Image: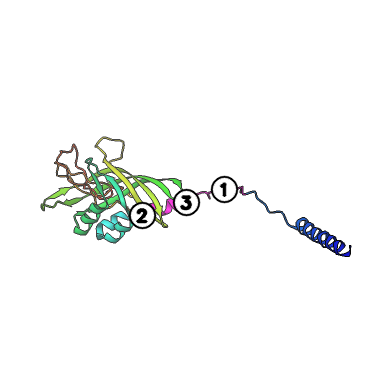
Amino acid sequence: MKKYLSVAMFLLATALMAFSQFGCATPQNTNTNTVSIATPTPAPDKAAIEAELTRIENDWPRIIKEHDVATVRQIEADDAVFVYPDGSVGDKAQDVKDMEAGSLSADSWEVLDLKVNVLDNDSAVVTGRNVVKGGKYKMTDGKIQDISGEYRYVDTFVRRNGQWQVVAGAATPVQKGASASPTPKASPSSGAAPAMKATPSPRATSAPKGTPIPKPSTAPKPAPTPARTKTP
């Protein structure tokens, strides 16, 4: 009898212990759903971006005068695409090549009417006007093209790894009698675009600011336009 009583007491104690552990166990949270809180994107510092891109654009006259290849490599993106005044398409490689050869020169190269349109923290579009006087572009055959003239251009910039670079640009010559003033006022700091490329047509078309050196084209042009570099 005592034997059965001892077994019963043991079973009761075991049951109480198991119940105690079960009751004290902290229930695990099986809910795997998480709520992600979107972090608002900070508003772009427009003043700082405008100042930096204005500085870059206004540095082109110096870049062309000094044949500063290093700065061209830095400012133009490797995948940049440019449309020159004569309608041809160029890229960074062409600008670098012309800059290294010292193909582009000018007595004066002005950057006017700059306007920076900030899209967000890492992208912006710049428009402006270039006036090139005494501009010359040396062709591969040794001939010299007159690239003097006035141009309007547009450059698209993106910021990559903290560096603003031109990823696309286009320029077009301003015909005489257009709205642009024939004797524009000089900008605070003349800035131009990389070496523009002249076209073999009667009138060379040089990409004024914002577009790389244009490649020579066989089609004649109605008015002399500078060679293409980034923009005159």
Which image quadrant for residue 18? bottom right
Q: To which residue does mark 2 refer?
A: 56
Residue 216 visible to an observer of this rendering: yes
Residue 188 visible to an observer of this rendering: no
The numbered mark, 3 or 1, whose residue comes first in the sequence reads: 1
Where does the image place residue 164, in percent across and percent down from the top left? Answer: 39, 54
Q: Residues within 10 Å of mark 1 (few under 14, many from 20)?
A: few
Which image quadrant for residue 179? top left
CA–CA distance between discs 3 and 1? Answer: 26 Å
Residue at position x 37%, y 49% in the image: 157
Q: At label 1, which amino acid type do we have?
A: Ala
Secondary structure category for the residue under label 3? helix
Secondary structure category for the residue under label 2? helix
Residue 50 magenta:
yes
Q: At label 2, which amino acid type do we have?
A: Ile
CA–CA distance between discs 1 and 2? Answer: 34 Å
- Of badges 3 and 1, nearer the viewer stands 1
The numbered mark, 3 or 2, whose residue comes first in the sequence reads: 3
Give the magenta range.
32-58
Callout 1 touching callout 2 (CB < 8 Å): no
Residue 37 magenta:
yes
Where does the image place residue 141, in percent across and percent down from the top left? Answer: 10, 52
Residue at position x 17%, y 47% in the image: 146
Q: Residues within 10 Å of mark 3 (few under 14, many from 20)?
A: few
Residue 47 marker: 3
Q: To which residue does mark 1 refer?
A: 38
Q: In terms of depth relative to the viewer, which is nearer, 89 or 63? A: 89
